[in-house]
Amino acid sequence: MNQHVTIDQMLAAFEQAGMRTTRPRRAMAEQLVVWGAAEREFSSEDLWHAVQEKAPWVGRATAYRTVQLLQDLGFLDRVTFADGTERYHVVAAGHGHHHHLTCEVCHRIVPVDACIAPAAFETMAQQSGFAISGHRLEIFGRCPACQADSLR
Amino acid sequence: MNQHVTIDQMLAAFEQAGMRTTRPRRAMAEQLVVWGAAEREFSSEDLWHAVQEKAPWVGRATAYRTVQLLQDLGFLDRVTFADGTERYHVVAAGHGHHHHLTCEVCHRIVPVDACIAPAAFETMAQQSGFAISGHRLEIFGRCPACQADSLR
DNA sequence: CCACGGAATGATACCAAGTGTCAAGAGCAG
DNA sequence: CTGCTCTTGACACTTGGTATCATTCCGTGG
């Protein structure tokens, strides 16, 4: 469990979705695997810049399109930080429903399993009449390293 | 309870915070009270446009500044919708900690009291070592009216 | 009632992030 | 290899928000 995603998995997902495995997509998958292993978060713009160092011919629009795509395919998670910025990170393979605890200083991300009780959803659905389809939970804090830093 | 905010309350809050009750702020407070009563959500840009009809001399920057300010003062809540857009709405007076259930079609907002159990925060704090400082929970669904619409 | 100091404003320029368009390029099936 | 079509790259454009700064106008103290 908590295995990091491989390039082959991403490319296979493209094929399976009836999409082509093109050179730009391979280049970006490579970069994302690296960032996934390092558990680093990034914006679409970041991805574009990083990929350009290895493959300068990749266009900006393509980077944005690919991030959108990989998000839809479930390889990327959009995470909101305490300062309101939104970035992405590579979701670990075989990781089910979870949310994110993020450091408001260094932006480190820790997945957490905690969530609202299903019964609570049931209750609010009945009280409001809504058909509930999804939710997002973001938890903010300061990671151990940044707590230590602020004491100095 | 669940009383809507009045213009006087907003202006009093400005004074109490050592800020001036200027003409633009009055104009925006008026608009916000209307939207608050109608439980309508809006962006900073929306506010600017709306206020301009009554007070064309109000500048864009001022609208943005005022929204930021009122958010800090606790009169406005930032709400995230299912499509990822972020907008504001006037928080009802005397309403404590709560989250939002939003309609993914018409953007209607319903406040809900449900939240994570304090014990769960305790657990994740201990497991991760983080000092937890805050959180955001957004719940998405389809309101009764929009469910009915989609059947037609 | 007036005058003054500084907060607040409005105009404008600017910036970052993301989208739409479309001709050209390149997977992949046959 | 060939051709169809998905995908791309370039770039103009839009949107949403911020920085700057001279000018305005609150609100206090006289």
Image: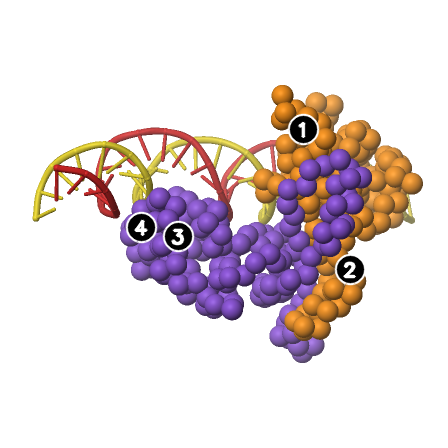
Chain colours: A orange, B purple, C yellow, D red
Position of residue B33 measured from the top left corner of the image (x, y, whole percent): 41, 63
Position of residue D17 measured from the top left corner of the image (x, y, whole percent): 49, 42
Determine the CA span between mark 1 and mark 2: 31 Å
Q: Is residue A101 visible?
A: yes
Determine the CA span between mark 1 and mark 3: 35 Å
Write the residue at 53% across / 54% down: B77
Q: What is the chain letter for disc 3?
A: B
Q: Which residue is mark 3?
A: B13
Residue A117's disc is: 2
Which amino acid type is shown beneath numbered disc 1? Cys
Q: Residues within 10 Å of mark 2 (few under 14, many from 20)?
A: few
Q: Residues within 10 Å of mark 3 (few under 14, many from 20)?
A: some
Write the residue at 83% across / 44% down: A14
Position of residue B131 measured from the top left corner of the image (x, y, whole percent): 69, 37
Q: Which residue is mark 4?
A: B21
Residue B32's disc is: none
Q: What is the chain letter for disc 4?
A: B
Which amino acid type is shown beneath numbered disc 2? Ala
Position of residue B150 measured from the top left corner of the image (x, y, whole percent): 67, 73
In front of the other: label 3 or label 4? 3
